[in-house]
Amino acid sequence: MKSPLVMGVLNITPDSFSDGGKYFSKEKAVEYALKMFELGADIVDIGGESTRPGSDPVTPEEEKNRVIPVIKEILLTKPGSLLSIDTTKSAVAYDACKAGAKIINDISGLTFDSEIMHVAKEFNATLVIMHIKGTPGNMQLNPFYENVISEIYEFLLRQTQKAKEAGVEEIIIDPGIGFGKRVEDNFEILKNLSEFKKLGYPVLIGLSRKSFLGKSLDLDIHERDTATSVAETLAIINGASIIRTHNVGNAVNTRKLLNYIYSEKSDV
């Protein structure tokens, strides 16, 4: 089993579902990003627009005002940090890459602003293509699938082909846990995660504190870290290459334990 990368979540928003407003100032955002790297994060994913169910979009200008100063300050303080910009807007992706971000994490899978793949090509950035059904504003209003795995697979196949044709060289796929999915759909995705590896790209998974865990176990959002660790463990076993998480320390420890279990030689 290949050891996965840990991607820490940094929401520079007033309304994100888990930590909205907590890191809204540049100083607090930079401080938290550096702390995540100290805890063992390989990547920090920076977002300036909430994509929680029912959220409203913000303007590109507002989004850039939130994220660009943070990206610049992180790289000034800790040069070489691997930063991802979590955006669906090509204008935001462009300025973020110009400031030093190396990954574009598009939760719309190129469906909101297809120009974003050309930005990835221009900056030779890695592009994360995620599946979503609908928009953050309406995605949880009775989503339905005949076959959730095959439908997501076909979507990711189409969108990765578009990106390759546009000249994007590095692609990561994300089946989109919680983005237009029923509780049972999310468990089906987790159980069949290895199916998506057949597309030939690294698989990113974001399970952290998601509502399907809370609904299944009747847990408030701030009581879901243990359930998150269990789900992330299963995701790693089933082939996830990158774990996107709010609790970097827990994810790093999960990775360490699995490395002990699955390595040929153990020091413990």
Image (tube, rainbow, N blue to C red):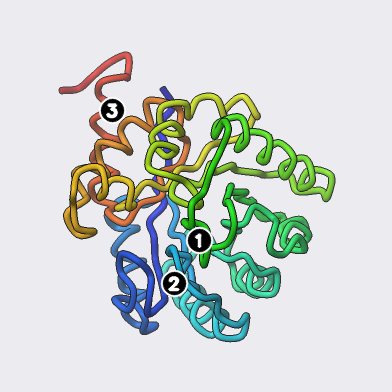
- Give the image location of residue 66, x and y in percent: 49, 81
Residue drawn at (55%, 76%), measured in percent from left and top?
A: 57
Q: Quadrant of residue 161?
A: top right
The residue furthest top is: 264
Q: Is residue 261 left or right of residue 30?
A: left
In this rendering, which labeled residue sits more in front, label 2 or label 3? 3
Of the residues shown, which amino acid type is indicated by label 1? Leu
Q: Which residue is mark 2?
A: 74
User: Pointer 2 and pointer 3: residues touching (CB < 8 Å)?
Assistant: no
Q: Which residue is mark 3?
A: 258
At mark 2, the secondary structure is helix
Residue 199 in the image: above or below residue 75: above
For disc 2, the neighbor class at 10 Å (few under 14, some 14 to 19, many from 20) is many
Please tell me which residue lies in front, 180 or 104: 180
For disc 3, the neighbor class at 10 Å (few under 14, some 14 to 19, many from 20) is some
Q: Which residue is mark 1?
A: 83
- Give the image location of residue 196, x and y in percent: 57, 30
Residue drawn at (43%, 59%), measured in percent from left and top?
A: 44
For disc 1, the neighbor class at 10 Å (few under 14, some 14 to 19, many from 20) is many
At mark 1, the secondary structure is strand
Tell which circle, 1 or 3, labels the residue nearer the N-terminal end. Answer: 1
Residue drawn at (34%, 58%), measured in percent from left and top?
A: 37
User: Pointer 1 and pointer 2: residues touching (CB < 8 Å)?
Assistant: yes
Of the residues shown, which amino acid type is indicated by label 3? Leu
Q: Is residue 106 left or right of residue 90?
A: left
Residue drawn at (59%, 42%), measured in percent from left and top?
A: 173
Q: Quadrant of the N terminus?
A: top left
At mark 3, the secondary structure is helix
Of the residues shown, which amino acid type is indicated by label 2? Ile
Q: Quadrant of the C terminus?
A: top left
- Rounded to the nearest angstrom, the CA distance separating label 2 from label 3 is 30 Å
